[in-house]
Image (tube, grey):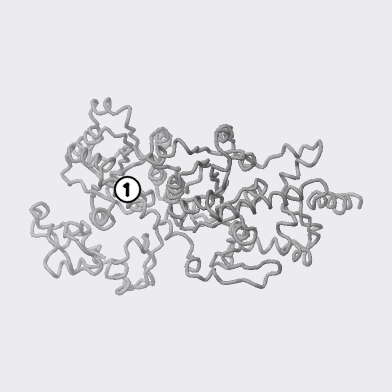
Amino acid sequence: MAYLHYQNLIDRGLVPLRDMEDVVNGYLDKVVDWIPGVKNMRLKDLPSFIRTTDSEDIMLNFAKHEVERISMASAIILNTFDDFEHQVLQAMCSILPPLYTIGPLQLLAASTAESSLATIGSNLWKEEPVCLEWLEGKKPQSVVYVNFGSVTVISNEQLIEFAWGLASSKHDFLWIIRPDLVRGDTAVLPQEFLEETKERGLLASWCSQEEVLRHPSIGGFLTHCGWNSTLESICGGVPVICWPFFAEQQTNCRYLCTEWGIGMEIDNNVRRQEVEGLIKELMNGEKGMEMRKKALEWKELAIRATEPDMEVVNNGYLDTVIDWIPGMKNMRLRDFPTFIRTTNHGDMVLNFVLHETHRVSMASAIILNTFSELEHPILEAMTSIQPPVYTIGPLHLLYGQIPESRAASIGSNLWKEEPGCMEWLEGKKPQSVVYVNFGSVTVMNNEQLREFAWGLANSKHNFLWIIRPGLVRDDTAVLPQEFIRETKERGLLASWCSQEDVLRHPSIGGFLTHCGWNSTLESICGGVPVICWPFFAEQQTNCRYLCTEWGIGMEIDNNVKREEVEGLIKELMTGEKGMKMRKKALEWKEHAENAAGHGGSSFNNLERLVCEVLLAKTST
């Protein structure tokens, strides 16, 4: 928008400058309050091509010329997102051709399934892989990342001021010093600086910036405020210290500091004392904490902006009742497997499911890991329209009924289990522990992780929480230190466990689950009531049945809040509804054991399957 008003600046006599003294004499502090959608701006915050005394300046006139040609465009495409620059985008829409915000592009590319977009990078410098290896050994939010981009140049004096500011801050740092960073010279750092910081600093010529800014060890970013770096800091949820160089970097800096609340600016005449002070404030000061919180909020908005357009998910449409499917009652669209939640007729997964269900009629038999008593109405309805249906579940109970079979030793777990979980449970009272496991595929963001954490902490109940690697989307799970301290006597965190054994343990009083089918059956076999937080696929359907048909579940809203988590855990563990659910869960446990036991429905169905399908095929 500032470029659009270059001609206005000229017409008002503000540009070109009278002489270059105007750059330092306070003239650039003049407030510009008449550009639509842009507020709290000074001349110094506008793109730096106005800083010339020459009316024929090539960059000033190039910017003017390109702006004049905009009206000829069919559309304008911007690498930003609506929530980030709402006011200025609204103002631009009223005077420009159709405008499309499609950013942050790096998130959009990553979310584009099976597309060549996902492998495109914008980096022309050779990266040093050692950067990420070095970060692996650092504590969360302990490292200052310093990178002035691919064009910025500085003097050797400025280089040395930045160096001693970093050294004096006493913080770990990763500093990218590309070969041509120092104007007309080679970057030469003092030997004393290198010796003093060798244990806590890494110098490199280039790195994969997106990956670095997503790394949990990064606590702050000292940047030139290029637009790519600005968006990458937002996508990483990392607050910044700004030292803009040229072009629109001054504008980005102003917005980072005053509009978006995640930046602090260093004076152009850089001094080590200021660098040191700002780094200390950024990394462990009160303002730094506020900026970090705000940066995480912007990160969440950026992620949402690049997800598929799912307005119908939130506008009540999914509450539409579906009452015409045989064998299924009390169902809403939101209770169906999530592959319907697409706006694309050509959606790959939706069409894969359609294709596979069309092929069902070609099968000799359908084998289901369930038992007749659990899903009787729907199994009856399926039997009337499908090939023969054999229910042979719960499989893990059935294995134990097959004498001298290797089946009894078969497991479906690909993760390494921590044996300490069972030992820890041995010291707990019956039905006193909440078991939390969101399975092997579910992902969440760090904000949701923290809400679950504080909900568990505030419930005051014992808990065993499985936090596997990869649980937090594009990040490492980082729990607040206060949470760790508060729950150390009553909580155990582990990366994986033997879930069947855990759910059969008498100390388990409830299960906070994603409602995957294995977890659903294992909770039934353990006689354990559940709190449901479904993620995708048929987990929504399982959740609906657990809560309304089988009477052993309560659902948490997808937009998880600690107060709701706390309340549901308390109800599950000690409330009247929790007692009824526990009683019902024990009834279902008995039904499951009977079905898998000798002479039970699943036991008999397995024998029928062998005789009627498998042996019959062999004999023909």
Residue 292 percent across, percent down from the top left: 32, 48
Residue 71 in sight in this render? yes
Q: Is residue 58 above or below residue 468?
A: below
Name the element at disc 1.
helix
**Disc 1 marks which amino acid?**
Arg
58 vs 80, nearest the viewer: 80
Question: Front-most of 477 and 464?
Answer: 464
Q: Is residue 199 left or right of residue 432?
A: left
Question: At 52% from the left edge and 37% from the top edge, which residue is drawn?
Answer: 494
| 503 sits left or right of 485 in the view | right
- Residue under label 1: 292
**Which image quadrant is residue 103 in?**
bottom left
Which residue appears at 22% of the width and 58% of the height?
47
Residue 207 in sight: no
**Residue 65 location, x and y as percent?**
25, 67
Residue 396 higher or lower than 64, as above or below: above
Q: Residue at x 31, y 44 (%)?
A: 221
User: Which quadrant would residue 342 be assigned to in this image?
Assistant: bottom right
Q: Does residue 147 appear to the left or right of 613 in the view shown?
A: left
- Where, quadrant-wise, is the N terminus in this rendering? bottom left
Spot occupied by residue 537 in the image (x, y as percentages of width and height):
60, 57
Q: Is residue 406 above or below residue 152?
A: above
Which class describes the residues within 10 Å of circle 1: few (<14), some (14-19), or many (20+)? Answer: many
